[in-house]
Image (tube, grey):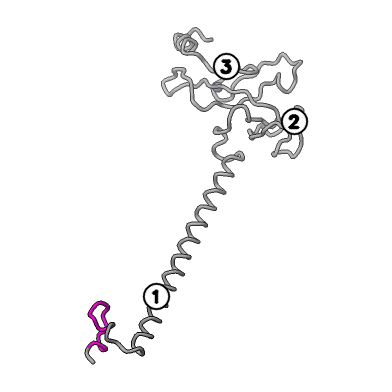
């Protein structure tokens, strides 16, 4: 009867056990595995919730949250009424201005880009992610009003080219453009 008093798995007692002993042992094992299954489901549920939140944050960021600068230049639009940048893909039959999510009306225009930046010591450089700028001529083709970058103050034209190394060197030498 000693084996029954301390039924450690692997001590050989199971092989010699009676059916009445084995049944509760099996039941116990089943219960434990059910519990760990429930725990696993809880963990998986937790992971899913975390992933869902992460996806939500990413979607928010893409729709004009913190990282509007990640919008590809060809899909960057600016709402003329709110000055907000948004992402839009032009569809067939679309005409300018385009639908802005910030007004719910067609107040969006294709953005131009400025890749100029100044470092802390005042030297010009080229940045990787552009500042999106709404050029006045894009909104009103007849205007002669110039548009300046709100970030660095340089002139921005339609289809504004990124600065060349030569232009940056000249700007740093004090020759302006
Ligand atoms: Zn700029």
Where is residue 121 drawn, in percent x and y? 41, 20
Q: Is residue 27 left or right of residue 159?
A: left
Q: Quadrant of the N terminus?
A: bottom left
Q: CA distance from mark 3 to mark 1?
A: 67 Å
Which residue is labeled 2 in the image?
92
Q: Earlier in the sequence, mark 3 or mark 1?
A: 1
Quarter of the rendering containing residue 85: top right
Q: Main secondary structure of the magenta part?
A: loop
For the residues bearing labels 2 and 1, Cβ distance under 8 angstroms: no
Asked if the magenta segment contains residue 110, the reply would be no
Q: CA distance from mark 2 to mark 1?
A: 60 Å
Q: Earlier in the sequence, mark 2 or mark 3?
A: 2
Q: Which mark is residue 161?
A: 3
Q: Residue at x 41, y 77 (%)?
A: 30
Q: Residue at x 59, y 23 (%)?
A: 113
Where is residue 166 drawn, in percent x and y? 47, 10
Residues in magenta? 3-13
Q: Which mark is residue 32?
A: 1
């Amino acid at each position: 009867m000693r084996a029954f008093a301390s039924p450690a798995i692997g001590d050989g007692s199971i092989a010699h056990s009676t059916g009445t002993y084995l049944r509760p042992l099996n039941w116990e094992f089943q219960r434990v595995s059910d519990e760990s299954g429930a725990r696993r489901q809880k963990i998986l549920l937790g992971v899913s919730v975390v992933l869902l939140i992460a996806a939500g944050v990413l979607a928010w960021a893409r729709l004009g949250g913190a990282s509007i600068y990640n919008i590809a230049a060809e899909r960057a639009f600016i709402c003329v009424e709110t000055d907000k940048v948004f992402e839009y893909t032009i569809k067939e039959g679309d005409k300018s201005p385009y639908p802005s999510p910030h007004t719910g009306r067609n107040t969006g225009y294709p953005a131009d880009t400025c890749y100029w930046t100044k470092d802390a010591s005042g030297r010009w450089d080229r940045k990787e992610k552009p500042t999106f700028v709404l050029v006045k001529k894009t909104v009103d083709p007849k205007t002669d009003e110039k548009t300046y970058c709100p970030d660095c103050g340089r002139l921005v034209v339609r289809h504004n080219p990124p600065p060349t190394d030569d232009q940056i060197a000249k700007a740093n030498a004090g020759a302006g453009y």
